[in-house]
Image (cartoon, rainbow, N blue to C red):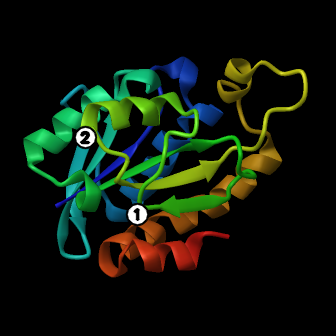
Amino acid sequence: MIIVAGLGNPGREYENTRHNIGFSMLDRIAKHLNIDILEKKHKALIGKGVLGGDKVILVKPQTYMNLSGESIREVCDYYKVDPENDLIIIYDDISLDVGKLRIRGKGSAGGHNGIKSIISHLGTEKFNRIRVGIGDKPKGYDLADYVLGHFTKEEQSILDDAGLKMPKAIECIVNEGIESAMNKFNG
């Protein structure tokens, strides 16, 4: 069983913001796999399906970004998965250009509060992750205002291309392993 979680904030006011790119990308995976993410469980919205012959659980924590670890821990415990091998987290990264994907099998939080929470609750930095570039904030912008802002039409077009790659990246991690996915998808 594989758990794929996209990070974001619940609520209409956060829909389609930079910080919610994890939710947006998870929606694209759900559409690709024909999974509805509607069930309320483990402080999250979840959907269940199959990916490459394996059961997959898609998770959108509803705890707000900074407490994502609460939900992720509950999901991992309930489904008895090993985070190091069976968990993939998708989230935003301001240090990457818009739409760039960066896949890793472990690492620090890099200043991302959602990842800090997950590391704290799981007790490990060893879990698969896909960072999605949202671009660096312009000079003079407040970081919170920037990440809670919306993409331009040009950026949205770039993200549409990244969204097409996302299900393939997940399938590659599951079927071929993290190293292969890193080689194929890290630009």
* Residue at mark 1 to residue at mark 2: CA–CA distance: 16 Å
In what element is the residue under mark 1?
helix
Residue 97 placement, left or right of 30: right
Compared with 150, 82 (above or below) is below
**CA neighbours of label 1 inside 10 A, class few (<14), some (14 to 19), many (20+):** few
Q: Amino acid at mark 2?
A: Ile
- Residue at the right extreme, as displayed: 139
- Rendered image: mark on residue 54: none
Residue 56, given in percent of the width and then of the height, sits at 22, 59
Q: Is residue 77 visible?
A: yes
Q: Does residue 82 appear to the left or right of 174 in the view shown?
A: left
Q: At which x and y percent is residue 132?
A: 59, 51
Quick one: quadrant of the C terminus? bottom right
Q: Which label belongs to residue 32?
A: 1
Which comes before the other along the chain, label 1 or label 2? Answer: 1
Please report the residue visible at 52 percent of the width from the left and 72 percent of the height from the top.
Answer: 182
Residue depicted at x 61% and y 69%: 186
Please identify, in this view, whether the residue under mark 1 or under mark 2 is nearer the observer.
2
Tell me the amino acid under the disc marked 1: His
Give the residue at mark 2. Answer: 46
Of 71 and 54, nearer the camera is 71
83 sits to left or right of 17:
left
